[in-house]
Image: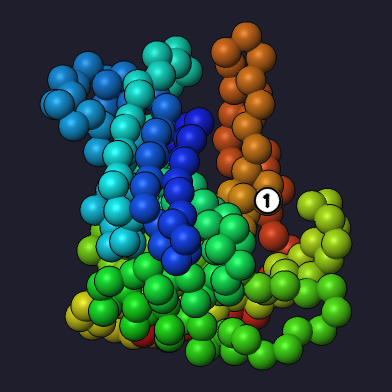
Amino acid sequence: RPMAAVRVRAGLDAAQRIVGWHYRNVSPSILGQRGATLGPRGDSQATECSSGIPYAFGSRKVEWVSHPSPIPVGFWRSVGASINLFAVESLVDELALAAGQDPLQFRRANLSDPRWLAVLEAAAALAGWGTPLPAGRARGIAVGSAFNSIVATVVEVSGSSASSFRVTKVAVALDCYLTVNPGNVEAQLVGGVVHGLNAALYGQQTFSNGAAQRRNFNKNRMLRLQEMPSVAVTL
C-alpha cells in the first residue's frame, strides 16, 4: 500500500475542547498511478477515515497532497484506513495528554455519535480499562470506522522500550450492523489482530535505487505462537 507522511495540528481551548483540526496526508495515489482521473476531492484512499469522523473538532480542514512516487503501489488490506486511523487516533491521544485527561474520558467528551460511543465503551469494558495494571504494563485505546463498520480496540503491552516490548492482550469491539455468522466475524477479527501486528512489527520494506528488496511476504518475519496475545472479541 502507499507510504504516507501525515501532519496533524490541533488546538484546545481553556475547557480542553478541540477548537481546530488541520489534517494533511501526503501519499502516492494507487488509482492515479494507473491513469485514473481524480476528481476535486482527490483519492478516496488517501482521505478515508480522516474526514467525516464524529469528533467535535471545531473548525476542521482535511487535505491530500499527491506524491509523484515512481514506486508502484497497490491495494493491500485496509489501505488508507490503516494510515489515517493511526494518525487520527495518535493525535487524539496527544490531545488527551495535553488536556491532562484519560484517553478514554477524552474520547467520550469529544465524540457525538452514539454508535461510536457504544463501541468505545464495549471495548473498554472488555479490556477492564481503568483497573490496576502490573508494573511495566500499559494500555492504549483507539476507535474508528471503515467499510461500514465501527471498531474499537484496547491493546495491553509490557516492556520498557521499543525493542523489548510485547503485546500481551487485545480487546476488540465491533459494530458491523447485522452479524450473520458471529463465529466467523470473531475469527476474522482475531486474524486481523495477527495481520495487523505482523504488519506493524515486522512488515518493513526497504528499497535500493527504487527497487523493493523483499519480493514477497515470505521474506518478512511473523508472530510466533508463543508471542500471540490473548484476544477477546465482543460484537
The local secondary structure at tag 1 comes to helix
- Locate residue 17 relative to residue 164 in the image: left or right: left
Q: Amino acid at mark 1?
A: Leu
Q: Nearer the viewer, residue 55 or 181?
A: 55
Q: Nearer the viewer, residue 138 or 59?
A: 59
The answer to which quarter of the image holds residue 80 is top left
The answer to which quarter of the image holds residue 189 is bottom left
Q: Residue at x 15, y 26 (%)?
A: 40
The answer to whether any part of residue 73 appears in the image is no
Residue occupying the far top of the picture: 209
The answer to whether any part of residue 211 appears in the image is yes
Q: Residue at x 57, y 71 (%)?
A: 101
Q: Nearer the viewer, residue 169 or 113?
A: 113
Could you say where residue 95 lies in the image, as x and y percent from the top left? 53, 57
In the picture, the quarter occupied by the N terminus is top left
Q: Which residue is mark 1?
A: 201
Q: Nearer the viewer, residue 206 or 40?
A: 40
- Locate residue 25 relative to residue 153 in the image: left or right: left
Could you say where residue 99 lies in the image, as x and y percent from the top left? 56, 63
Q: Is residue 26 above or below residue 78?
A: above
Circle 1 packing at 10 Å, graded few (<14), some (14-19), many (20+), is few
In the picture, the quarter occupied by the C terminus is bottom left
Q: Residue at x 59, y 49 (%)?
A: 199
Could you say where residue 166 lies in the image, as x and y percent from the top left? 77, 65
- Locate residue 56 relative to residue 227 in the image: left or right: left
- Locate residue 216 relative to residue 21 in the image: left or right: right
Q: Residue at x 42, y 27 (%)?
A: 26
Could you say where residue 36 lies in the image, as x and y percent from the top left? 19, 21
The mark tally for this picture is 1
